[in-house]
Image (spheres, rainbow, N blue to C red):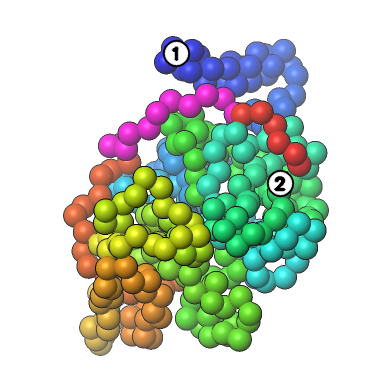
Amino acid sequence: MARAIRTSLLIPSALAVMLSGCGQELPPHLRPLSPEATALLTEKGMAQEAPIFVRVFKEESELEVWKAKDDGRFHHFKTYPICNWSGALGPKIRQGDKQAPEGFYHVSQRLMNPNSQYHLSFNLGYPNKFDRSHGRTGNYLMVHGDCRSAGCYAMTDALIEEIYALARESFKGGQEKFSVQALPFRMTPDNMRRHAKHQAYPFWKTLKTGYDHFEYTRQEPKVDVCEKRYVVNVAFLDTPARVDPKGACPIYEALPLEKAPDPPMIQEAQKQKKTTRPMAFAPIVEEPGASPAASEPSAASQATIGRGTTFGFGLAPAKPTYSGFAFRSNATLGAPTAK
């Protein structure tokens, strides 16, 4: 079985070589990364087969791809403009509302569609456990090409080819599924205040816990669903066989987090400041079984990593490096899905 899986992983590459040798144009899902993308990976010290993490921001019409490195954290690779998305800010509720989803999703190989009618696509996996717990309906919500959208996030064909290739290579490297944070906007305190009167605001506060986790740690947050809400970065005590998305949350405790180091340029800029003042971090203390905190940091606690915010958490033991991650081998891309 292991030998068969390893062989199947080589099929796309072998086919690509055969077709290129015959002078035939490769199908979109087999095309290698462009020389420019490959050069950027090399410049940033990233392996093509390293795991990826994706964030989508509606209001900014941007899709980010992050790549794991040997320090056990994700590093920004590239930000892509979203060509088109339909609906308005707020989650998808029902089939036909033409809303693009918001939430925390996971994309496995079987959700990759090399035969999409929109050039290439991957299914976000909507509805997930959270969506189903609220009775939300709809299917085939994608990130795809062709720059047209009816509830999806549409890219240009050239950009979806690059994003698809990055995902394909990460699967070859052993990543079983990659996370997608589909967010209404960059969830900074200013943006949260600006949208505080929106009817989706209570829901967005739960999304902010996952956004803040990634901004602070540059690591994928652990996400569970219970009591019809997202619960981020907790360990259940006396965990049942299955956490019921609609049922009461088992007693849990917040997991400790380790802040990602500041990028070198930021560190140097901080050293050159003539005056400094301590970061006003407010440690978050949660009682077992309590809802994960979604507090907003004070202005003094804003870190300058990316465009997001961070706030104080307890420190955790050092995380394992990417080279120490254990992955199982994966087969080739699954059967095509609609769109």
Badge 2 vs badge 1, beta-carbon distance below 8 Å: no
Over which residues does the magenta segment extend?
324-333
The answer to if 69 sits in the magenta stretch is no
Kind of residue at disc 2: Tyr
Q: Which mark is residue 189?
A: none
Residue placed under numbered mark 2 in the picture: 140
Q: Quadrant of residue 21?
A: top right
The correct choice, above or below, for 18 with respect to 32 in the image is above
Q: Position of residue 59 (x, y in %)?
A: 65, 70
At a point 39% along the width and 56% down the height, the residue shown is 221
Q: Residues within 10 Å of mark 2 (few under 14, many from 20)?
A: some
Q: Position of residue 301 (x, y in %)?
A: 33, 80
Q: Position of residue 202 (x, y in %)?
A: 54, 77
The correct choice, above or below, for 251 with respect to 48 in the image is below
The correct choice, above or below, for 237 with respect to 191 in the image is above
Q: Is residue 129 left or right of residue 27?
A: left
The answer to if 325 sits in the magenta stretch is yes
Kind of residue at disc 1: Met
Q: Is residue 267 left or right of residue 112?
A: left
Residue placed under numbered mark 1 in the picture: 1
At a point 21% along the width and 59% down the height, the residue shown is 316
Q: Quick check: can you spot residue 266?
A: no
Secondary element under disc 2, as helix, strand or loop, is loop
Secondary element under disc 1, as helix, strand or loop, is loop
Q: Nearer the viewer, residue 322 or 197?
A: 197
